[in-house]
Amino acid sequence: MFGVTLIAHAAFPAPVVFTSEGLFFAGMGAVFGAYWVAHHREGTPGRVAVVGLGLAAAGCFSVATVLPFLIGPGSLSRPTSTGQLVILSPRAGEIFQGDPATVPVSLRLSDATIVPITTIHVVPNQGHIHLYLDGSIVAMTGLQTTLSVSPGTHTLRAEFVASDHGPFRPPVLAEVTFAVQPRGGAA
């Protein structure tokens, strides 16, 4: 799951990402090849092979690093969205009871649409909602959900992200702080 999430958050178009990853792995192969030749082949042919493989590795790593910037400088910038996100629940300063408490989350998204699929074809006003509790992602959701939250003071951040799970520029965010108290006690 983490691999899918990381690739889904790549800021570059898929062909650039996969080409760069391929060059990285080719460079790693050249490094291992140079190591093997250095330890198993003697003489001038072995040294020439080691130098050649070393140069190939350095070239692969260099191109893999700069390729996204050379091929797609426009891909470095993220789209702008006119979407606006508001957290309706929980309200700022609201106190919930429980250990843990069930906290209803209700959001309002205007001038944008939530889409069910992940794609690299980014449309400025289509995307997904990511929910973060105290800085850690807890859900990729729609406009309504519930969270099980332990006692304490918490910050809930909702972000409307593009359909490739990358942020818009500027980010479309909403944030609220609320508290959870154990029943019959103070946080």
Image (tube, rainbow, N blue to C red):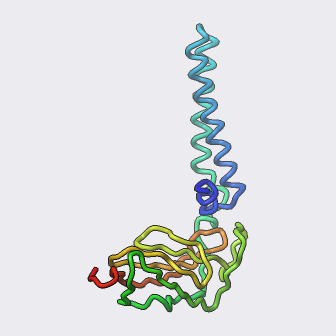
From the top left corner, tell me how far across and down residue 118 is, in percent: 70, 68
Which residue does the image show at 61% across and 45% down from the upper left? Answer: 63
- Residue situated in front as seen by the camera: 15 or 181: 181
Name the quadrant of the N terminus: bottom right
**Is 101 situated above or below 27?**
below
The location of residue 66, given as percent across then percent down, is 58, 50
Q: Quadrant of residue 95?
A: bottom left
Residue 177 x %, y %:
38, 83
Question: Looking at the image, which residue is at 50% across and 68% down?
Answer: 137
Above or below, comparing residue 29 to residue 102 in the picture:
above
- Residue found at x 53% / y 78%: 159
Residue at the far front: name it. Answer: 184
Q: Residue furthest left?
A: 186
Left or right: where 156 falls relative to 109:
left
Question: Which is more toward the observer, 34 or 110?
Answer: 110
Picture coordinates of residue 69 (x, y %)? 60, 57
Residue drawn where x is 59% and y is 19% of the image: 36
Could you tell whether 96 is left or right of 31 in the image?
left
Number of marks in the rendered image? 0
Q: Nearer the viewer, residue 81 or 105?
A: 105
Give the residue at the far top of this rendering. 43
Relative to 114, say whether 75 is above or below.
above
- Quarter location, residue 51: top right
Image quadrant where one finds the C terminus: bottom left
